[in-house]
């Protein structure tokens, strides 16, 4: 059984698995708005996937841009990456837009690093 809070040393969107713990957030200029987070999973509508490979296989695509196009065209839904802060009190989502995951209304690029 996989540990629910597995630290990931070199996190990328492609290698995140539900339960991984890493620093996640965004950077704006010199400021780093990231903190230790637990990755929940990827979500389209009400369907959740534990990793990106599984999601892309179900949709029938090989890259993020095609994933975005297909989910929008076929299901009229967006793809989200979901996180909780390490204490499990604050839930947030990054959304797939223009081929990469973004955060907030300013569409800052999601950044990931080791916790």
Image (cartoon, rainbow, N blue to C red):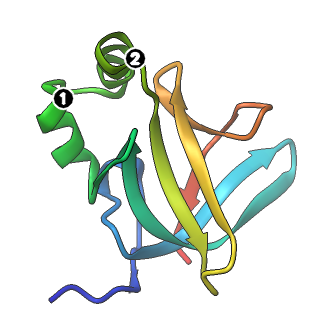
Q: Is residue 11 above or below residue 103?
A: below
Looking at this view, is 74 or 30 the one in front?
A: 74
- Left or right side of 80 for 91: right
Task: Name the residue at 27% across, 55% down.
Answer: 51
Task: Name the residue at 31% across, 24% down.
Answer: 67
- Left or right side of 5 for 98: right
Give the farthest residue toward the front. 46
Residue 103, quarter of the rendered image: top right
Q: In what element is the residue under mark 1?
A: helix
Task: Name the residue at 18% across, 24% down.
Answer: 61
Q: Which residue does the numbered mark 1 point to in the structure image?
A: 59
Q: Is residue 20 above or below residue 71?
A: below
Residue 63, x across and y down, in percent: 27, 26
Residue 78, x across and y down, in percent: 46, 29
Residue 15, x across and y down, in percent: 30, 56
Task: Name the residue at 50% across, 56% down.
Answer: 82
Quadrant where the N terminus lies?
bottom left
Q: Kindly report the distance in space between the C-alpha atoms of the residues bearing marks 1 and 2.
A: 11 Å
Residue 20, x across and y down, in percent: 39, 74
Q: Which residue does the numbered mark 2 point to in the structure image?
A: 72
Structural crowding at the residue carrying mark 2, measured as other residues with C-alpha within 10 Å and reported as few (<14), some (14–19) or many (≥20) = some
Q: Is residue 59 above or below residue 51?
A: above
């Amino acid at each position: 059984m996989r540990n629910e809070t597995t630290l990931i040393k070199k996190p990328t969107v492609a290698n995140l698995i539900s339960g991984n713990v890493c620093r996640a957030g965004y950077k704006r200029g010199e400021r780093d708005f990231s903190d230790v987070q637990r990755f929940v999973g990827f979500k389209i509508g009400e369907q959740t996937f534990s990793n990106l490979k599984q999601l892309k296989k179900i949709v029938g695509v090989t890259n993020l841009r095609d994933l975005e196009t297909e989910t929008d065209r076929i299901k009229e839904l967006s793809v989200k990456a979901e996180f909780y802060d390490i204490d499990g009190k604050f839930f947030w989502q990054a959304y797939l837009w223009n081929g990469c995951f973004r955060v907030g209304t300013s569409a800052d690029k999601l950044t990931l690093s080791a916790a």
